């Protein structure tokens, strides 16, 4: 663990994070500092365990990591960690709903589709929220939820799966890539309001991305093409999730959403 | 493995050849792969368990730094 005095020294990379007001309240400062040290070291906040939430937040960040461990400078979401988590969330009676927060640059096709299928088949309400970016394999994960939101400024890149470069250990034939691409297209078109033709058209559009074919959808554009259900933020996503949870409570017990 | 991402391959694979020394340890009754940082602490890389609830435990999330002395006591 980082020593306490390290946090307040001027050499700290983010001196602004300790607001002057907190210095006067000693007890509160301690908690803030602890939280900050965990934020700095691991890049994530640890929630206090006393909060017994019925909503679980699942964040998909960086690269979705598949069968191969990516080098350490990549931020990754490990699918072998997410999948048992989803199993536990499905089994745990305390958890009533799941919010998936996406800020991902894509990643492994198989791992991404596996997470998307798990999210779609879980019996509890799932709401997704795309913040920042939900690119490439992030698209099927976002649409797998029962209801999806995108932040106004968030972007989603839809582009073809590359023929060169990003293929390791699989046959680099056109047919293979075409089949992989079809899996993604099929999943997205069956789990959102976008048609297969429209999604294909966006995927192979020229002139939109400077050096590549494909489309960049920003906020409302993703809603207009039918990919995402609504433009919104955290508040609207949580409200929707609570609404879905209530609807599920009022349904007959054998009902599968 | 097939990556579907707008990032260029060399950006993702940079540093792929550098080896990370991983050890298999047991911490709080859970087997895990961890990276030794110094002779006292480990960084959790992944946990190996058939109990799905282990994956929800906040202290066992990948990236957490744990103390080796705890490991020795609880194995």
Image (cartoon, grey):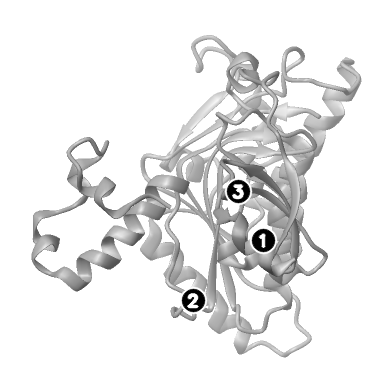
SS at mark 2? helix
Residue at image coords 16%, 69%: A26
Q: In this view, does A96 lie above or below A87?
A: below
Q: In which quarter of the image is residue B55?
A: bottom right
Locate residue A166, reporting x and y percent.
Answer: 73, 19
Q: Which residue carries the number 3 mark?
A: B42
Q: Nearer the viewer, residue A79 or A158?
A: A79
Q: In which quarter of the image is residue A134?
A: top right
Q: Can residue B28 be seen in this view?
A: no
Give the Cα distance between marks 3 and 1: 10 Å
Q: Which residue carries the number 1 mark?
A: B71
The quadrant in which the C terminus of chain B is found is bottom right
SS at mark 3? strand
Locate residue A101, reporting x and y percent.
Answer: 51, 53
Q: Is residue A11 above or below residue A18?
A: above
- The mark total stands at 3
Residue at image coords 57%, 31%: A74
Q: Which of B12 and B34 is in front in this view?
A: B34
Q: Residue A242 carries which label?
A: 2
Q: Does B17 sit left or right of A13 as displayed?
A: right
Q: Does A225 sit left or right of B73 as displayed?
A: left
Locate residue A91, reporting x and y percent.
Answer: 74, 77
Circles 3, 1 touching at the beta carbon (< 8 Å): yes
**Disc 2: host chain:** A
Q: Which of marks 3 and 1 is nearer the N terminus?
A: 3
């Amino acid at each position: 663990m980082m020593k306490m005095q390290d946090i307040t020294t001027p050499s700290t990379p983010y001196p602004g994070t300790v607001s002057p007001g907190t210095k006067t309240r000693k007890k509160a400062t301690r908690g803030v500092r602890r939280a900050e040290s965990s934020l700095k070291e691991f890049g994530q906040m640890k929630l206090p365990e006393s909060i017994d939430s019925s909503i679980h937040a699942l964040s998909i960040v960086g690269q979705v990591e598949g069968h191969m461990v990516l080098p350490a400078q990549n931020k990754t979401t490990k699918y072998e960690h997410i999948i048992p988590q989803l199993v536990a969330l499905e089994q745990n009676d305390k958890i009533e709903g799941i919010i998936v927060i996406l800020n991902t640059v894509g990643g492994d096709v198989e791992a991404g589709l596996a997470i998307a299928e798990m999210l779609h088949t879980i019996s509890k309400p799932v709401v997704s929220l795309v913040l920042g970016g939900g690119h490439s394999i992030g698209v099927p994960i976002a649409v797998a939820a029962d209801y999806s939101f995108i932040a106004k400024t968030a972007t989603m890149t839809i582009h073809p799966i590359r023929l060169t470069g990003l293929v390791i250990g699989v046959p680099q034939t056109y047919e293979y890539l075409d089949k992989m691409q079809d899996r993604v297209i099929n999943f997205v078109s069956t789990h959102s309001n976008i048609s297969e033709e429209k999604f294909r058209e966006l995927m192979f559009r020229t002139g939109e991305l400077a050096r590549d074919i494909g489309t960049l959808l920003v906020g409302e554009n993703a809603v207009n093409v039918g990919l995402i259900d609504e433009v919104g933020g955290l508040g609207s996503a949580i409200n929707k999730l609570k609404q879905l949870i209530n609807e599920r409570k009022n349904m007959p017990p054998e009902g599968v959403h | 493995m097939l990556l579907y991402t707008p990032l260029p391959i060399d950006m993702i694979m940079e540093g792929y050849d550098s080896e990370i020394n991983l050890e298999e340890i047991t911490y709080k009754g859970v087997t895990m792969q961890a990276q030794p940082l110094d002779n006292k602490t480990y960084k959790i890389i992944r946990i190996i368990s058939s109990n799905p609830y282990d994956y929800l435990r906040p202290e066992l999330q990948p990236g957490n730094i744990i103390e080796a002395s705890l490991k020795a006591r609880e194995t």
